[in-house]
Amino acid sequence: MDSNVKKIACVTGASSGIGYATAKELATLGYDIIAVARRMDRLKELEEDLNQNPETSDCRVYLAELDVRNKLDVQAFYDALPEDWKGIDVLVNNAGLAKGLSKFYEGDTDHWDQMIDTNIKGLLYVSRAVTPGMISRRKGHIINIGSIAGKEVYDNGNVYCGTKFAVDAITKSMRLELAVHDVKVTGIHPGAVETEFSIVRFDGDEDKAKTVYKGFENLIAEDIAEAIGFVVTRKPHVNVNDMVVMPMAQAVAGVIIRKDT
């Protein structure tokens, strides 16, 4: 990136995990950061982290408390951005979650609604608000965080897998429709990353969540943030369409080679 030009990155789900790490990575690369999430206290911690790090202390930070599931609030968030923040260069659609792990015929329909509303509709609402500006400027980059669950199904993953397959399809459609406007689109699909993901899936049961990552070296949020950093620093004519990032021990979505502990 030209050191004389400050670009703007908007990261949803920035209060923890991949989103938090991505905001820090992009700030290190010279981006000003719009950090979006439901938990303002966590966003303020992120801002403090960026301010205290010598590498990112000159980074401007704009915090927005937002639930991406609310269409009207998403548009109001974008409309309320000051003019010098509206020119978003990179949008990272990271907000997403899994709820529950069960056969579909035993599934909690409230869990289904939460996953569909966040993983699919939230991504669409934010993209719909931000993309017209990228088109008018003829530049921009949308990065959608999918999952290996959007490439391969696994037992008891049914609706979560379905939402991530949708993210994959939407990402490909975005790429098809935005290439003519010089807007890049990338899908990044992580395997097992130890964040709050499993804690959320199991309704706060930390002991149960820990068993997901037992016996192998899982990915961490910074691994995915580094991948995003790689993607956004390619030459203008280079687009990384699709990237699947897996732990060495995870052969496919539902098969992890675990060592005795």
Image (cartoon, helix red, strand yellow):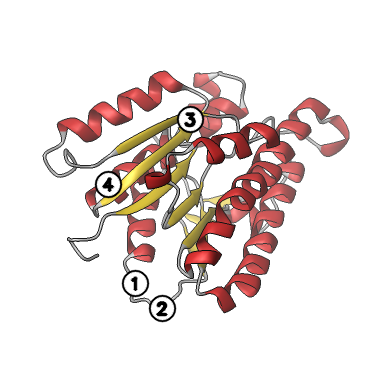
* Most foreground residue, 155 or 69: 69
Circle 2: element type = loop
Quick check: marks 1 and 2 in contact, CB under 8 Å?
Answer: yes
Give how far apart the Cα atoms at labels 1 and 2 are: 6 Å
Q: Which mark is residue 27?
A: 4
Which residue is disc 2 drawn over?
Answer: 238
Q: Residue at x 18, y 61 (%)?
A: 4
Answer above or below: position of 154 versus 58: below
Q: Residues within 10 Å of mark 2 (few under 14, many from 20)?
A: few
Instruction: Pick whichever of labels 4 and 1 is earlier in the sequence.
Output: 4
Q: Residue at x 23, y 42 (%)?
A: 59
Circle 4: element type = helix
**Marks 1 and 3: which is nearer the front?**
1
Name the residue type under label 3: Glu
Quick check: marks 4 and 1 in contact, CB under 8 Å?
Answer: no
Quick check: marks 3 and 4 in contact, CB under 8 Å?
Answer: no
Which residue is disc 3 drawn over?
Answer: 196
Give how far apart the Cα atoms at labels 3 and 4 are: 22 Å
* Most foreground residue, 42 or 82: 82
Name the residue type under label 1: Arg
Name the residue type under label 2: Val
Q: Which mark is residue 150?
A: none
Instruction: Pick whichever of labels 3 and 4 is earlier in the sequence.
Output: 4
Q: Residues within 10 Å of mark 3 (few under 14, many from 20)?
A: some
Q: Residues within 10 Å of mark 1 (few under 14, many from 20)?
A: few
Q: Residue at x 59, y 59 (%)?
A: 132
Q: Residue at x 39, y 23 (%)?
A: 42
Circle 1: element type = loop
Q: Position of residue 86 (x, y in %)?
A: 45, 48
* Residue 115 quadrant: top right
